[in-house]
Amino acid sequence: MDCYTANWNPLGDSAFYRKYELYSMDWDLKEELRDCLVAAAPYGGPIALLRNPWRKEKTASVRPVLEIYSASGMPLASLLWKSGPVVSLGWSAEEELLCVQEDGAVLVYGIHGDFRRHFSMGNEVLQNRVLDAQIFHTEFGSGVAILTGAYRFTLSANVSDLKLRRMPEVPGLQSAPSCWTTLCQNRVAHILLAVGPDLYLLDHAACSTVTPPGLAPGVSSFLQMAVSFTYRHLALFTDTGSIWMGTASLKEKLCEFNCNIRAPPKQMIWCSRPRSKERAVVVAWERRLMVVGDAPESIQFVLDEDSYLVPELDGVRIFSRSTHEFLHEVPVASEEIFKIASMAPGALLLEAQKEYEKESQKADEYLREIQELGQLTQAVQQCIEAAGHEHQPDMQKSLLRAASFGKCFLDRFPPDSFVRMCQDLRVLNAVRDYHIGIPLTYSQYKQLTIQVLLDRLVLRRLYPLAIQICEYLRLPEVQGVSRILAHWACYKVQQKDVSDEDVARAINQKLGDTPGVSYSDIAARAYGCGRTELAIKLLEYEPRSGEQVPLLLKMKRSKLALSKAIESGDTDLVFTVLLHLKNELNRGDFFMTLRNQPMALSLYRQFCKHQELETLKDLYNQDDNHQELGSFHIRASYAAEERIEGRVAALQTAADAFYKAKNEFAAKATEDQMRLLRLQRRLEDELGAQFLDLSLHDTVTTLILGGHNKRAEQLARDFRIPDKRLWWLKLTALADLEDWEELEKFSKSKKSPIGYLPFVEICMKQHNKYEAKKYASRVGPEQKVKALLLVGSHGWSHS
């Protein structure tokens, strides 16, 4: 126990801080860190170094080298910088490297040095150049704040959705501020800057002067400022050597410490643990590191070489040419178990387990002591929690063995927390490995979540490890293995030294029918890499035609897209491809393509019938489909033509088409319709009634109703209307007119071809029993009974 706490350093009476080594760095730096622009991502993220920056005149003619390393010093990327002078480097929340240039351009690179995109911070920044820049993180994403040569600030709170904000001007500002930082209050980014003894807060509307409460007198300048990882607290280093600590709103003072060093520090960073009441700041000079807080004394470390500090959620990472260390407040559970002479239940349980392994009776004594106090459950929980905060696997195992030992003497201790901690530690130990280089603490891991950790492993192309973690934690396939395999496949298509056939086969063998994997997304990535043929091969494995077709259209493989759409049986998808083909191909090629696809041709005809009639006519002409062409002209004669001459001309064209199609019936019927139209026009001119567009039967009926019986009979003869039909038409018309006298004359004009029962029925329909009786006597014997029943006459003889 005593040896284990040897690196614990008390800060006051209530907190201990310890610094332990994460990795022994083996990155073979050729220059000191102070001669490089340095950026390290939080949550155990990568480190970027830009060697030979332009700030050193002696190397201004040498192109700098941008190098990216893992937290353990393993090289990830190296590239010669060919762009403009860089002012600042920083990492986004998605682990993209943001390089802010002097001209206001921000270049974005991936973790492997692949260029992603670039954007500009505006014309004003371009004209006035960049003096300083900071990358900050908010709940909305990662932002960039710029100080220009005109001493004005411009910022964007989210580089993924770039919206530039020009901050208000500081009155009378004639030189660069001595220090500045970005604050995030009420979901809005602000700038806090120091000019001499004054502090100014810039928001979106105004510049206001602020004063830290309780600041010691005599301050003439602020040399450094630091905001906490959560943006809740602020620290100010003054020229008197005093460090003021308070809330970021500058409304409450937490404490103030005088370090008696007036030289400006290289870095100042908050070092606090989540949910801890202790607040501490780490201050670094060239060869000295100091931890200060609400205590009269400080903790001091000697720095043997150039070091760089990285703020973390629960501490500070410190790396140099040779080592990478972590400085943090000792968690409460660890402190209670390991501090000297501790009688905490967790400490007693750990001792009991050790004595049990030695087969000593002291194990029983310790265990009885815990049980008598009723603290065995608390002891198990303390050991489990402390195990999570330990970095060394041996100590983790020791604490977990103690927890497991204590559980044996509890009847109803839920095993979930123990099992979950074992799983979490196994994952953490895997990613902390030197070759992986992600030194996450337990608190950081819980804040980051397993999904984000998997994303970061995928980003580093550590696919096997990511899959093993998914399988070990039994994550749903769509969230775990499937998603990682999809990322692996997208990376695989970028390997241009392997043939398309081999890549497609390897991807299909690995993925198969894995749920949640979209071959179309992988094909899209292949197409984006310029491998069109590989994309087509991958699309063959995509079972959903709706996903295949859009990408094939994008790749200008429209004919293949049409075939796939037809195979799917989805008419909407076929129409989508047809309209795309229509715009892409000339008219002749488009029609020729349709001729080779009967289903597509049929669907396109249906479309043209409602939308493009002229195109439909062209299709019929090209196919020499005279039958359909004739039908088209008949429809057109009624739909488009209002003048009788135009309508007759269209019908004549239709008749000609029907003759070419050897459909004489349709041709004769069309010619009859032309004759009827001409006759109807003549009747309208002569009689002044409406005849146009009536059918032949309606025309005859209209003539009869108008009293033009001879014209009706002549029309019937001209168009060879059968006598039976003519008699029916005349009978109906005269009955509608209730011209019973004319009806009787008509019935006696000659023998009725339809018999006399219809006369009876028509009269009864008009409720005229008297007239019906006239015809009932003339009904033939076989229909006499029906006629008598209709008129209701029971006293008649059946002679």
Image (cartoon, rainbow, N blue to C red):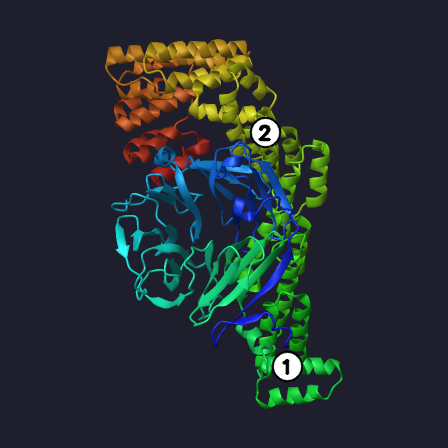
Is residue 544 something one can see in this rendering?
Answer: no
Q: How far across and down, in percent of the image, does residue 457 sit? A: 61, 50
Q: Earlier in the sequence, mark 2 or mark 1?
A: 1
Q: How far across and down, in percent of the image, does residue 40 sit? A: 53, 50
Residue type (three-letter) at the residue carrying disc 2: Ala
* Figure quadrant of residue 549: top right
Q: Relative to residue 63, is residue 120 drawn left or right?
A: left
The residue located at (47%, 11%) in the rendering is 655
Q: Relative to residue 368, is residue 328 drawn left or right?
A: left
Q: Relative to residue 533, is residue 130 drawn left or right?
A: left
Is residue 223 something one can see in this rendering?
Answer: yes
Q: For mark 1, does the 10 Å Cα neighbourhood hold few (<14), some (14 to 19), or many (20 or more) residues?
A: many
Q: How far across and down, in percent of the image, does residue 596 sit? A: 61, 21
Q: For mark 2, does the 10 Å Cα neighbourhood hold few (<14), some (14 to 19), or many (20 or more) residues?
A: many
Q: Is residue 732 above or below residue 5?
A: above
Q: At numbered mark 1, what does the secondary structure look like: helix, strand or loop?
A: helix
Q: Seen from this angle, which residue lies furthest left?
A: 688
Residue type (three-letter) at the residue carrying disc 1: Leu
Give the camera-side residue of 628 and 491.
491
Residue carrying label 2 = 561
Give the camera-side residue of 595 and 731.
595
* Whole-number angstrom distance, CA of label 2 to CA of label 1: 70 Å
Q: At numbered mark 2, what does the secondary structure look like: helix, strand or loop?
A: helix
Disc 2 and disc 1 in contact, CB within 8 angstroms: no
Q: Quadrant of the C terminus?
A: top left
Q: Quadrant of the N terminus?
A: bottom right
* Figure quadrant of residue 22: bottom right
Q: How far across and down, in percent of the image, does residue 420 sit? A: 61, 67
